[in-house]
Each structure stands twice: as C-alpha cells, then as structure tokens.
Amino acid sequence: MAKELYPTWMFYPIRLPAPGWAADVLKVFGRARSKIDSGTNHGVSSDTCLAAVRPALKGLGFKVESGKTAAQKIRRPVLFGENGKSKVSYEVDGFHPRDKVVLEVEAGRGAANNADYRDLVRAGLMVGVDYLVLAMMREYRTGKQTIRSYEQTRNRLDAIYASDRLQLPLKGVLLIGY
C-alpha cells in the first residue's frame, strides 16, 4: 500500500512548477502533521496550526504572527497616505520578505465563509507581494456535516486559473491542505 502524501497541495498556475521555496514550506507542514492533520485531529483551529508551524517557518525567514496584540500581528501595506505613512494595510498570518510570500492559514469554515476569496483579493492588493500560501483544512467536521475546505478552494482556484476573465496580480498561489 502506497504511503499517503502529506500535506496535499497544488501550485497555481498549473502551467508552472512550484518555486523552490515551496518545498521547504511543504516540509514544515509535513513535519507538523501529528498536530495539525485535519483528517485525524478534530477541532484544529487556525491558531493551533499556525503555532505548530511557526518555529520552522521563522527558521525559513518568515515573519509569523505570534499572538493577538498589535505588536504580535504582521501587517502588509496596501495604500499610502501623507508623508508616505501606510493608510490601508491588512493583517496576515505570515510574510517572507525576500521571496515576497504572504501566508494565510484558515481553519474549518474557511471555504464555507469565503475566506479563501478574501485572502486571494487581499494578497493581490498588498504592496510587495508576489505569492500567496493558502493553507486550508482538508476536512472540517461539524456534527453530521463534513466540509472539504481544501477541495472547495482547489475547485475555486481551478476555475479562476482556467478562465481568462479574472487575472490575479500574483506570480502564484500555493494551496496546502492540512
């Protein structure tokens, strides 16, 4: 029996190979599997997942949110006002300055609440961002319902990248199913 690959992932656009940094990010999620695998761990929050991958991501050069206070948040600018001061910015879960990668980790209802769309649009608006890493649960169980967040987001990204009607201003999106 073949060993299941973990995490599940896709890189967009699918006509291009994933950049070199993607393999390192995927290894980080793979090493945290025992804590974050949504197939075996119930009730994993985005904060739990982020806490499990934070140390290794920081080792790769990412700045990663470490809490809920303003000083622990990571903000990326969108618009600038007088004297060059950031007028509009968005909070992100992580950012790699050299590779210009924004990281967003979504938990259970991420796809059902369209957090994936929000993350795509916001990443496209941020200054100095070329890539988005979007980590979605493979499955989220609520009572009798199972939401397959990764699959839903993959289907949405397939449609966006297959259509020529919407052009994202990003070099690529790494979708991770944890």
Image (spheres, grey):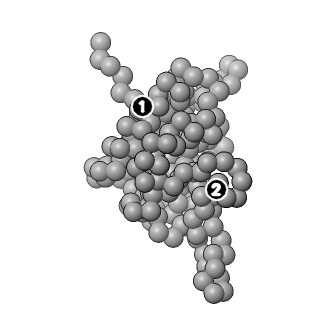
Residue at (65, 71) in percent of width and height = 88
Residue 157 seen? no
How many tags in the picture? 2
Q: Nearer the viewer, residue 95 or 42?
A: 95
- Locate residue 103 relative to residue 88 in the image: left or right: left
The first of marks 2 and 1 along the sequence is 1
Secondary structure of the residue carrying tag 2 is: loop
Question: Extreme bottom residue here?
Answer: 83
- Locate residue 18 relative to residue 39 in the image: left or right: left
Q: Position of residue 91 (x, y in %)?
A: 63, 58
Q: Position of residue 104 (x, y in %)?
A: 54, 49
Q: Few, some or many C-alpha atoms within 10 Å of disc 1 (few <14, some 14-19, many ≥20)?
A: some
Residue at (36, 47) in percent of width and height = 22
Q: Few, some or many C-alpha atoms within 10 Å of disc 2 (few <14, some 14-19, many ≥20)?
A: some
Q: Check disc 1 and give the amino acid type.
A: Arg
For the residues labelled 2 and 1, the Cα–Cα distance comes to 24 Å
Which quadrant would residue 41 be assigned to in this image? top right
Q: Position of residue 153 (x, y in %)?
A: 51, 42
Secondary structure of the residue carrying tag 1 is: helix
Q: Check disc 2 and give the amino acid type.
A: Lys
Which quadrant would residue 7 be assigned to in this image? top left
Q: Position of residue 51 (x, y in %)?
A: 57, 39
Using the image, tell me which numbered label, if any, was put on residue 31.
1
Which quadrant would residue 111 be assigned to in this image? top right
Using the image, tell me which numbered label, if any, was put on residue 73.
2
In the displayed structure, 59 sits above or below 90; it is above
- Locate residue 6 relative to residue 70 in the image: left or right: left
Residue at (29, 12) in percent of width and height = 1
